[in-house]
Image: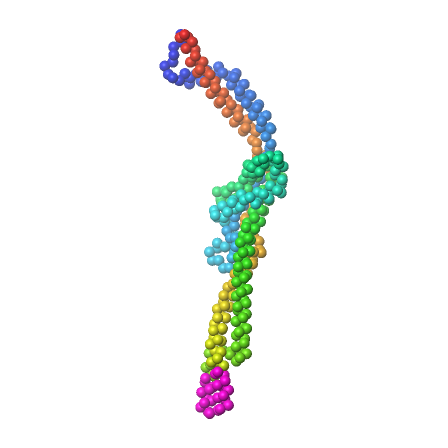
Amino acid sequence: MDPKPASGNYFDSTSLFEFFWRWRKPLIIIGIAAAIISAAISYMIHERYKSTVIMFPVQSNAIAKALLTDDMSGKQDVLQFGEEEQAEQLLQILNSDEIRSRIVDKYNLMQHYRIDPNDKYKNTRLYEMYSDNIAFKRTEFMSVKIEVLDENPKMASDIANDIASLLDSTKTRMQRDRADQALAIVETEYLRKKAAVETMTDSLHTLNLLGMFDYETQSERTNEQYAIALGKGDDRAIKALEKQLKIIADYGSAYMSVRENLYIQREQLNLLKKKYEEAKIDDEAVLTYKFIVNKAFPAERKSYPVRWLIVAVSTIASLVFGVLLLILFDNIRKIKKPASSEG
């Protein structure tokens, strides 16, 4: 009867070489079979080619402020590269449903990804395939990378470049929706203020026709001339000057009120006109929101699958799993052998 080992571990690590030698044939069969099967499976996987676009966000988004105003800080410089916040904004827009839908429709990705249009979960499968093949990442240099995998290298590069182009149109559409509202508000206020200024200008012109031109100068000189006429006893001059003094008394306060208010309103009108012109530029003009570092081009070599890696990993994993099974089988056999001997 064989003596039972003192330790609970029935697999002696010192006999590892002996173990592998004893089970060499099953292990060789497992390794060869795993290599053949994994190689066959890897050749069944569709090859995919990768195309990449790398771009930096811009710092300034407001065209009018960037081009038509003095900015000593440099934050509105149209040539200034964006930072983390702008990069995150680009990523959010790139992941938007608007861009995804336009790419799906343009390239008919439902058919291209071989998804059954009658499938109950066709859209879910489509979005999963889209996410698997199209990725957006922020690099350590604060740039944004668009990576597209596809079986057709030309299509992969076209999709990547189109997504980069759609970024501008999508962000422009988002900002123009707000710019339209801003322009409408500023335009309404500008036209209202312009009409008010024109009304005050007409009122001032009417006062001018009544003989009211410059209250301070006119009042001072008329009083001086009136005093002189009184001193000379010139009745004709006195009557004429009294008429002028009556005009000043009747319309002087109105003239000063209109004149001062008109000055203030014209200042406000100038500010509104500037705002209106800026809002109009922001609503109509278009600038790119990115700096393209690398455009996508059709890849010459596939990126997926890496067949040797699939075969190597599968073979090693199969061998490890086979070794574990053989160790378990060997230990079970050793346990049963002393038990049968004792019986």
Q: Main secondary structure of the magenta part?
A: helix
Left or right of 8 in this view: 182:
right
Residue 184: % across, % down: 55, 58
Q: Which residues are magenta?
A: 223-246
Magenta run includes residue 282: no
Q: Residue at x 57, y 53 (%)?
A: 286
**Which corner quadrant holds the N terminus?**
top left
Displayed quadrant of residue 133: top right
Q: Residue at x 58, y 27 (%)?
A: 41
Front-lying residue, 329 or 320: 329
Magenta run includes residue 227: yes
**Which corner quadrant holds the C terminus?**
top left
Displayed quadrant of residue 106: top right
Up-down relation of residue 291 to residue 197 (above or below): above
Up-down relation of residue 37 to residue 111 (above or below): above
Q: Residue at x 57, y 23 (%)?
A: 36
The image's colouring method is rainbow
Front-lying residue, 192 or 48: 192
Residue 11: % across, % down: 42, 17
Residue 98: % across, % down: 57, 45
In this view of the protein, can residue 54 be seen by the observer?
Answer: no
Q: Residue at x 51, y 87 (%)?
A: 240
Up-down relation of residue 192 to residue 315 (above or below): below
In this view of the protein, can residue 240 be seen by the observer?
Answer: yes
